[in-house]
Amino acid sequence: MESDKNLNNNWEGTNSKMAENNNSSKTKKGGRGIYIWLPLCIAVSVAVGIFIGNAYSIFGSGSGFLGRKGNKLDVVLDYINKSYVDTVNVDALIENAIPTVLAGLDPHSDYISADIMNRKDDELEGHFSGIGVEFIILNDTLTIVKAIPGGPSEAVGIQAGDRVVTVNDSLFVGKGINENKVYSTLKGPEKTQIKIGVKRQSRDELIPFVVTRAFVPVKSVDASYKLDNKIGYIKVSKFGSTTYNEFISAIAKLKSQGCESFVVDLQQNTGGYMEAAIMMVNEFLANGELILYTEGRAYPRENYYADNSGTCKQSQIVVLLDETSASASEIFAGAIQDNDRGLIVGRRSFGKGLVQAQYKFNDGSAMRLTIARYHTPSGRCVQKAYEKGDRQTYSMDLYNRYSRGEFDNRDSIKFDNLPLFHTLSGRPVYGDDGVLSDVFVPRDTTGINSYYMRVANKGLLREFSYVYTEKNRDKLKSFKTWTDAAKYLSTQPIVDNFADYAYTKGIRKQPYLIDESRKLLQTQLEAFIIRNFFSEDNFYEMFQRDEQMIKEAVRLLKANKATPDAIKKGAYK
């Protein structure tokens, strides 16, 4: 989608407005997803994403220690500026010096340049200012997949299939077109205008449009749908300022459809506002139950309790975690687990229990400094081990977990030397290394082989799905429901057509490997095609129809093994 990732002033070790406006909270204060298994890339990219994507805003604008004079760094910079033999860009020296200083601390204290902060503007605030389209870059051309309903592009008549040729009267095609350039060009301040020239299949000439940028919503609850007659599924991709409202809306929708139990999927959710996690888990906890507490050298212990306003206090809940679930996700899961309120299903989470404060500079850059740790109700901190100044080893942790088989076998998880804590009923849980699931589900590698990895990592699944959609748009538009479309697609030779297409993109046909991946390829291709016509809920329902972790959650809920009494008795084991 045409969107950018927003990092707001108010962050938890993901983010939080709690420190600035605790009275607005509903709590009392007294306290195989859609990614490809490339372990090294996962380890590095997730760690970097969590470094950039998390903070807890406590500092006010008056935190004046930064302007203090007389320290060595000020003296050095001043002396260089006045006396160095050549002209020096002192600002550039400062930009390089601050990250070096912070790099000597924990892995989550960080400096974010103004450029990155600008690119990351709006994700967690739930909206961005742009033209409101989903797009794909096909043959070096920006191609519209969908105009977002109610958005500015739909309002002026831009349609799925339109190819953008010019922007503001300049050519906008060729090798230089990439997602970053598209984002930076199409986004802009609200109510500003942009000229777009599109080529439409039914017209020979370019069609000019003038689009007035407007705020476009960015969802953090990606999907919610029924898994069974009485079981609802909610996929939460991040914890933003609109997540709680989206979450309770999803619950209300599912309850209206007869759902009494819930699966909350936090796989690949690296965090967000702490306040959002607290408000969401409050929906499931009884009055006075501890959600978490934060504590640091300069920040006294602060407790957060459930306030009895939750709407799901009697509902069974299963929380899905994987190795990339971090921070606010671990707050949510830890509160559920330590209060014996529901079951955690999946794999050990990332292990981020540090709390950052963000100080934003006048130039738009920001410093995030770790000022506290958060603890789950049992008293454990989930932060995994690190050495100050050694970020390389820390960033390799997920790869190391993969290498020792932890994603495939629970017995590969070593917790003998971890501190032992206990849930309310006395169940053992461990600190200092993420949240360990109650029920382990290994990663699903069915159908994943070298052929699948090549086509998936090259983006050919989504690309072919769009091409197929364009060739068969009239037929696909005739289906009233996504299930009817799926039935039709299941009768078509989509995988063979895809293999032909991939061959034109340089991927050699390997019949044995293609057959080995056929079911997975068929499911994902159908899901991407359905996404072009129907909702995100329908896409996820199709994409995840064989998801083993979800199937295990349903099994546990149908057997009533996620009730507090059953959990205390160990019925899930």
Image: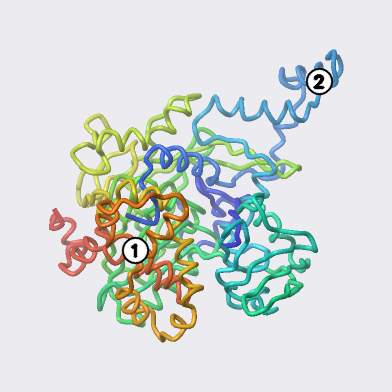
Q: Quadrant of the rendered structure where residue 149 is?
A: bottom right
Q: Looking at the image, is 334 positioned above or below residue 401?
A: below
* Mark found first going from the N terminus, 2 or 1: 2
Please state the horizontal and vertical placement of residue 499, each as a whole percent of the image. 37, 59
Can residue 489 be seen at all in this image of the molecule? Answer: yes
Secondary-structure class at tag 2: helix
**Side of 206 where 510 appears, left or right:** left
> Please, what is the three-letter code of the amino acid marked with disc 2?
Asp
Q: Is residue 183 left or right of residue 570?
A: right
Q: Secondary structure at mark 1?
A: helix
Q: Residues within 10 Å of mark 1 (few under 14, many from 20)?
A: some
Please state the horizontal and vertical placement of residue 84, each as a whole percent of the image.
Answer: 83, 14
Total count of labels: 2
Mark nearer the viewer, 2 or 1: 1
Relative horizontal placement of residue 211, taking residue 31 as reference (left or right): right
Up-down: is 441 above or below 79?
Answer: below
Where is residue 316? Give x, y as percent.
Answer: 26, 67
Q: How is the image coloured?
A: rainbow
